[in-house]
Amino acid sequence: MFRDLVETRSFSRSASLNGITQSAVSQQLRSIEVRLRVPLLERTSKQFALTREGQLLYEASREIIGYYQRFQHQLEEMRNIISGTIRLVAVPSLGLHELPPYIKDFLKAFPQVKIQVDYRRSNEVYESVAAGDADVGFVAFPSPRKGLKVETFKKDTLHIICAPGHPLLKKGPVDLAQLGQTKIISLAPEMPTRQGLDRILATRGLKFQPMMEFDNVETLKQAVEINAGVAFLPASAVASELAKGSLAILPHLGKEIVRPLGIVFRASRMVSPAVKRFLKALKTPRESTPPPVSDTPAPPPS
């Protein structure tokens, strides 16, 4: 309870996480202070603040809970039990469009497991896993981080996505250089998918200046739907729009633009049998099905 109180900075949230009332959290906190004979929170501060003794207890509580969880994991392995909760954190585009099939298959095989998915920006995914707030993280264009194990579990293709009435659709596969003559909209420069795309295009001698930039895929898709420009997006992110015909894939010449998708987990942390099985499932190739498309030509194979 105390660990959750410190990490959420909320009495009500800590109460919810532990299945007790908010007043019970206050009573338990007071009980700990009486037993230890030290104050744990700064009562005069308007903001949530720990005393030195409170900080020491928080650090100890994390270690105690860590030891207990490792014991639980070892016991489950000895008994071959696959249960518990798996905490995932992902950038929205992966969490919404890439993970659901994996989660669905895994829960079908292991119905006693619960999976929680939280959505964060790419840098926050790494931070959440490093802090132990999540078991596994998911990012695009993964990069090495100290204390973390980062692996590519899948690669997808970034297609040129446009509105069904875009004039370039009538010209067949286009040369990427031709896009310099059309409006391009893109993700924001600080986002890893945008940075990775820029690097790939640069190796081909191309550099585009987007007319508009967005910090999320959903808004970007809406801009493409109203024909504000074309964008580079994976087919999985626009599958429903391709199926209903509100977006189309514009075929292009040359090699595919491949985006690696990565999993992030703590290298030094003992994980539960459920997390081990989930990581194994992620690394097991799934049968890929072609994305639903409109009646526009599909991009040629590379």
Image: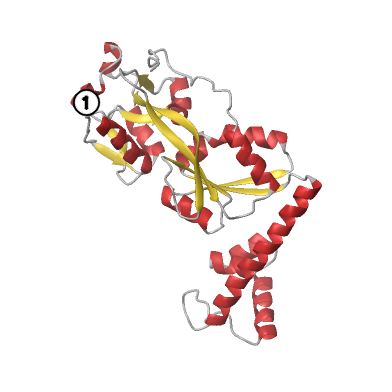
Residue 183 at what x, y percent from top left? Answer: 23, 29
Residue 249 at what x, y percent from top left? Answer: 37, 21
Residue 214 at what x, y percent from top left? Answer: 32, 41
Residue at screen point 53% across, 68% down: 9
Q: Quadrant of residue 226?
A: top left
Residue at screen point 62% across, 72% down: 60
In this rendering, the answer to whether 85 lies above or below 242 is below
Along the line of sight, the residue nearer the viewer: 237 or 173: 173
Q: Does dot 1 land on a helix, a strand or a loop?
A: loop
On screen, residue 205 versus residue 112, left or right, reads: left
View extreme (left): residue: 181
Q: Given the image, on which type of amino acid does mark 1 rest?
A: Thr
Q: Is residue 98 visible?
A: yes
Residue at screen point 38% across, 21% down: 248
Residue to which mark 1 is pinned = 182
Q: Is residue 11 visible?
A: no
In this rendering, the answer to whether 245 lies above or below 132 is above
Q: Quadrant of the C terminus?
A: top left
Categorize mark 1 by other alpha carbons within 10 Å: few (<14), some (14-19), many (20+).
few
In this rendering, the answer to whether 51 lies above or below 261 is below
Q: Quadrant of the N terminus?
A: bottom right
In this rendering, the answer to whether 138 lies above or below 300 is below
Q: Quadrant of residue 189?
A: top left
- Total marks in image: 1
